[in-house]
Image: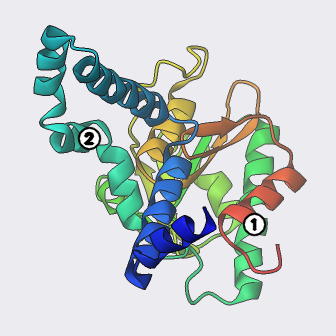
Amino acid sequence: MLDFVADIFKLFRWQDYVDFLIVSALVYQLLLLVKGTRSAQMLSGLALVIITFLLSSRFGFYTLHWILSNFVSPLVVIMVILFQDDIRRALTHVGRNPFFTAVPFVEESQVIDELVKGAVTLSQKKIGALIAIEREMGLKNYIEIGTKIDSKVKSELIVSLFLPYSPVHDGAMVLQKGRITAVGCFLPLSLSPIVKKTLGSRHRAAIGLTEETDAVVIVVSEENGQISLAVDGRLKRDIDAPSMRQHLGKLLRVKGE
């Protein structure tokens, strides 16, 4: 028996082992990418269709096999259509563009501190706000329809831009590489059926942007002053200042967090 196993392993080249490891890593990353999203359910449904297709051939269900064969034939095209958002997100991981590229550590921490202070002040005053922070995937498309500025992140500026009489208070603020680059931007609303109907347009916009990109979005509710954090299509609601600082430190990859 041991000789038989040894003979089998002799048939494999070193390239085969490397090939297997690469494919395994890709599959693992794919599963992590779609975990907890609508794509995970679609992937499960697609796997069920393929299994049914194979079993229908094995057990002689010719009509079912013919119907499924017409569905499975253009499988690559179907997968591209179904998982276009996840494919786009995965491709962005090929070229890394960390949020704080070339920004000193002290300034990194200061930006997060100013964001937390600004959000807490807005929360106390019950002033609604929406702040999108770019990470690896660019937000240029959303910046183009807003008002472009180039400013350091200051809590006083954040509060003043979201005051009710500010002409850009209804839109989103966008941060790139540790600076405020645009305000009054409009973000895509989430159409996911699992999003609670009680959530307003700001929260839906935060979820919508994080469904399409890897951005981190801070939301302040004008109804109850709650601070929420959206990432990867999920919303962490009612977080306090220490939790917000900790989450931002991890999500924005601040050294020492």
Name the residue nearer the viewer: 170 or 249: 249
Q: Do the residues labelled 2 and 1 touch (CB within 8 Å)?
A: no
Give the structural element (helix, strand or loop) at label 2: helix
Q: Is residue 71 visible?
A: yes
Can residue 128 be seen here?
Answer: no
- Residue 39 placement, left or right of 55: right
Horizontally, is 10 left or right of 255 in the view? left
Query: Which tag is nearer the camera, tag 2 or tag 1?
Result: 2
Percent coordinates x, y for residue 83 in the rendering = 32, 42
Disc 1 secondary structure class = helix
Residue at left offset 48%, top offset 35%: 40
Residue 203, position as x, y percentages in the image = 57, 32
Residue type pointed to by label 1: Gly
Residue 16 on image: x %, y %: 40, 75
Residue located 67% across and 62% down the image: 251
Three-letter residue code for mark 2: Met
The one nearer the camera, 65 or 71, is: 65
Q: How crowded is mark 1: few (under 14 residues within 10 Å), some or many (20 or more)?
A: some
Mark 2 or mark 1, which has the lower sequence index?
2
* Image height of 55 relative to 129, above or below: above
| Count of marks overlaid on the render | 2
The colour scheme applied to this rendered structure is rainbow
Per the image, the residue denoted by label 1 is 249
- When the figure is inspected, residue 226 is found, relative to residue 191, above or below; the finding is below
Query: Separation of disc 2 and disc 1 at Cα?
Result: 35 Å
Question: Does 51 appear above or below 176?
Answer: above
x 14%, y 13%: residue: 62
Residue 245 shown left or right of residue 80 in the figure: right
Say which of 139 and 86 sits in front: 86
Identify the residue under disc 2: 79
- Name the mark on residue 138: none
| Residue 254 locus on image (x, y percent) | 72, 75
